[in-house]
Image: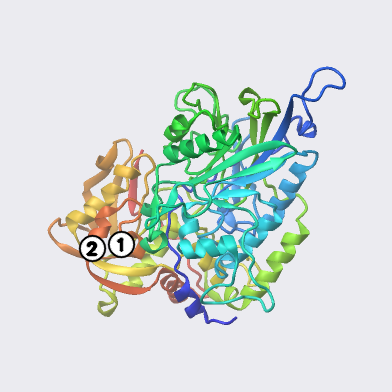
Amino acid sequence: MSATPQKKRASRRVLAAAAGLATVGALVAAMPAGAHDRGHGHGHGHGHKPRTVDVQLLSFNDLHGNLEPPAGSAGNVSETQPDGTVKAIPAGGVEYLATSLRTARKGSPYSVTAAGGDMVGASPLLSGLFHDEPTIEALNKLKLDVSAVGNHEFDEGATELARLQNGGCHPVEGCYEKGRKFRGADFPYLAANVTKEKTGKPLLKPYTVWKKNGVKIGFIGVTLEGTPDIVTANGVKGLKFHDEVETINKYARELDRKGVKSIVALIHEGGAPASTSYNYDCDSPGAGDGISGPILDIAKGITPKVDALVTGHTHQAYVCTVPDPAGKPRMVTSASSFGKLYTDTTLTYDLRTKDIVRTSVKSANHVVTRDQPKAADMTSLIERWNKLAAPIANRPQGWISADINGRGSTAPEKPLGNVIADAQLEGLAPADKGGAEVAFMNPGGIRADLVHKASGSEGDGVVTYGEAFTVQPFTNMMNVVDLTGAQLVAALQQQVSGPNEASPKILQVSKGLTYTLDLTKTGAARVVTDSLKLNGAAIDPARTYRVAMNEFLAGGGDGFPALGQGTNKLVGASDLDLFNAYLAAHSTAAAPLAPPATDRITVVQ
């Protein structure tokens, strides 16, 4: 390797963009009925030219560079059984995703593959160490036709995103393999609602048109308008993010004028279905059923010219029907995350009108199971990059006695969240390191679980550098700031109010901070303020506290403006360095670190 791990980490301008709800969704496992008829025409009588052809749209979202199967509970999808029980199915990994997509395409002469954003960013070490070049290479091999940008595509800024699209070796680290130059994405990244501040022009292509044998389908790609709120300032410098609905409607009119009547919107924004099981019927009519969240209003506002919406961001699984502004049903889909699922949608294309027959649109989600053959080309890609990463990835950092769940935990307080917050407090508590009294960690920045089972030859219970990196891939610098007690209370209230009211973002807190979260109440009242204590003493609104957090939170990210009001800032080590130091200090092979109790936040439901 040309650079030391320290230099590599320093050069990574990666940011803690939150991925919203981390619930593991899932989807429907069998091939859809009639898949063998795909692409065959629907005509009348013998010898007539068919009036329609079926176009197969395969889609997925939020891969986040998970080339290898995600470990632990974060690698499962939930399936509701006929008796009502829920079963966890291990899923994902590009070796299996490639096989699933290639199998699904068989017998479909008209097949197009699209993605809903966050293909890269917040990636495990195998991809993240190499600025996600391995993932772009894998997506090229998957024959991805088009992707929207997600917020994580901006983690390292517009210049790096352009490099991922256009190719060329990294400006600091150069080429990773002798004689090989990174060629960039073979598919277009679409960013219709992202413009350059100076020129007002789109950063990347706003749309693309897929064509085959006279069939034309337009794809418009947008990321969520709120991207600047969940990406550090450097990542979105010089860019403007516009309203999703207005942007899609504008370009749908443009495509329509050009004679493209069939349009799919790729939107990196999503919702939350009433159930996390992939085979949940999103259109069931019961009270509280269906889907909630930002995508609902977006779907209701997008012009009827758009025939289907492929969404993402919330890492949920759903296939829902949401009426368009004309009251006609329209498919809104999302395929969970990490390549654990894909969506198979049939678009019936009318050769005369050049439009989609909306009443014939069918869609289903499918599990990328790990009991199918691995795609050999993906296996060799993973082996090639793993060989380059091995000297860094395999270094032991510590030992654990059992799984410590982070991403895979659906509880407000996560065991791994406690470990990370404690690591940050311990590393920044000394007076010369910042004098921190309490630490906060954003839940979306915890990207995986710490899994007891060995991922390679290191042995069960060993935490390698690669595994620690997968949990904390952003390499955010830590900040210690002054906040008043009143600002601390305001920050905790912002977890469950304002932009976070619909989908609460519960901060992970270091030991010593305790309070009650009453979810039977609404908004800021959910935080029971008189229960809030630090080391047994009530929080004094007038007193100043030294608070540790990553630079993303310290900038007010994730809907926490109160945390952005800190003063007297000291910049410390990176979150990953503190995490690894804590593992080294608190575990040995003979005395591994046990999952901590989750008793800091008392939840009333």
Q: Is residue 308 left or right of residue 143?
A: left
The label on residue 554 is 1
Mark 2 closeness class: few <14, some 14–19, many ≥20 residues within 10 Å: many
Nearer the observer, 104 or 601: 104
Whole-angstrom CA distance, mark 2 to mark 1, is: 7 Å
Relative image position of residue 601 (x, y in whole percent): 33, 51
Q: Callout 2, which amino acid?
A: Gly
Q: Residues at badges 2 and 1 in contact (C-beta under 8 Å)?
A: yes
Secondary structure type for disc 2: loop
Give the residue at x 36% y 53%: 229
Secondary structure type for disc 1: helix
Q: Residue furthest right?
A: 46
Q: Residue furthest left?
A: 542
Nearer the observer, 342 or 68: 342
Q: Residue furthest front?
A: 258
Relative image position of residue 458 (x, y in whole percent): 63, 72
Relative image position of residue 473 (x, y in whole percent): 49, 65
Q: Quadrant of residue 301?
A: top left
Nearer the observer, 274 or 82: 274
- Residue 522 drawn above or below residue 63: above
Q: Callout 1, which amino acid?
A: Ala
Relative image position of residue 258 (x, y in whole percent): 58, 36
Give the residue at x 62% y 22%: 359
Q: Quadrant of residue 10?
A: bottom left
Instruction: Name the colour scheme.
Output: rainbow
**Number of marks in the rendered image:** 2
For the C terminus, the quadrant is top left
What residue sits right under mark 2 in the picture?
Answer: 566
Q: Is residue 439 visible?
A: yes
